Image (cartoon, helix red, strand yellow):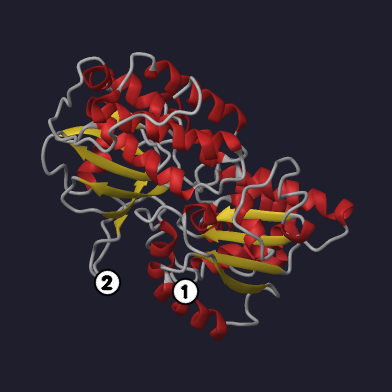
Amino acid sequence: MIGGRGAAAGDPLPASAATRLLAASAAEGGDVRSIAPDELIARVERSGLRGRGGAGYPLAKKLAAVRAAVPASGREPLVVVNAYDADPDSPLSQTLIERTLLLVAKGAMIAAVAVGAREAIIYMHPRAEAARRALEKELGMIEGSLGGVLISIAVGPGGFMGGEESALMNLLESKRAMARQRPPYPAENGVQARPTLIASAETVAWLPQIVARGARADAKLVSVTGAVARPGVYEVPLGTTLGGIVDEAGGATGELKGLHVGGPTGGILAAVRADVKLDFDTLKAAGTHMGSAQVRAIPAGVCIVNEAARLFAYLAKENCAICVPCRVGTKRVQGILESAYSGLGRESDLAWLDELGTHMERFSLCGFGITAPSILRTTMREFADEYRAHIVERRCPTNTCSPVRSRRYETMTQP
């Protein structure tokens, strides 16, 4: 562990040679106005910094794309720092701001200088009220010392979709939190048609250390939840195994069945896959994604079919409803899974679930619908016996499920 949120204020962090964010100083980075923007972008590229918001896109490419779009646009570029923490169980941005108050603001200023922007917005969740008030107070005290960049704070509406990149742009334009068709991408046509850099708070928080001393961006904040001794936010080297992350949180409190990685749309891996490493490409190959960087330990007594249904019920409630594959797909999957554990399963259900997942992946407008099927892909692959027990044998393998449906509601031949 490089640092944990659960420690009392002022507790010393473990000694480590690794670069870390939770113990970093906002004083690093110096006066970046004397550094040419191309050199700033080159330093970011050398650091290997990939976006920490889930997709893992190289930040240097985003910076260069925004800067290149400015002349043709004729509009002032804008930097938006996504500190929204859409996943309520993974408050990474809130933790960063609470522990290193101005690090995110300093990173936003460096990003603004790199793309030629004079304005940056830190976009936060309404539940992070204490962190927002502290940041507002500090920004007021240092106004005028951020390289000529005006930094303001915007508060989103709450709810999961408020943190999605294109829905965020709509919200900043006083519209509903609904996904946009892409392309055009924010770098070319973002908030109010301005070339816009959108990066997570954790991503920009790396910039002061990268600019000051060429740090390698080789650590990641994670939120460890579920059946562990010390749930909380930790900072671990990229490449740490999932089992190692659970150990950093004090270890499991009992026998585990699975590891849910990536937040509400992330896949569930069997506990025996604890050797899977936390990095963007390895997680993707395993069938999940970095997402909100939540690692949730699922105890042995949980029924995975029921758990998958619970997740899709949440997603069906939280999606923005603008695109049919996601709006209808999440609800259909919820219905099939609830029917399965209510003793109404059919042998054709697995094929329907697979087809619905494919449609969501191929045709959804944003990452919400594209990544949600990872829940189905991983659980149907790694917990096939539990699906079979419910659908074929009409029994719950853990004896924990209670029926929630007495019949299947259908308006056409498909479920």
Q: Secondary structure at mark 1?
A: helix
Q: Marks 1 and 2: which is nearer the front?
A: 1
Position of residue 380 in the picture relative to residue 386 (left or right)? right
- Image quarter in which the C terminus is found: top left
Mark 1: amino acid: Arg
Residue at 23% across / 29% down in the picture?
271
Q: Tag 2: Cα neighbours inside 10 Å, few (<14), some, or many (≥20)?
A: few
Residue 258, horizontal then vertical, whole percent: 25, 32
Mark 2: amino acid: Ala
Of residues 415 and 323, which is closer to you in this image? 415
Res. 47 image quadrant: top right
Which residue in the protein does label 1 denote?
Answer: 132
Position of residue 209 in the picture relative to residue 336 (left or right)? right
Location of residue 167 with respect to 174 vertically, above or below: above
Position of residue 48 in the picture relative to residue 394 (left or right)? right
Residue at 55% across / 43% down in the picture?
50
Tell me the tag on residue 9. Answer: 2
Location of residue 8 with respect to 80 vertically, above or below: below
Q: CA distance from mark 1 to mark 2?
A: 18 Å
Residue 269, horizontal then vertical, whole percent: 31, 29
- Residue furthest bottom in the image: 141
Tell me the tag on residue 118. Answer: none
Residue 219, horizontal then vertical, whole percent: 41, 47
Is residue 238 among what the camera can see?
Answer: yes
Is residue 372 among what the camera can see?
Answer: no
Residue at 43% across / 28% down in the picture?
282
Location of residue 50 with respect to 25 vertically, above or below: above
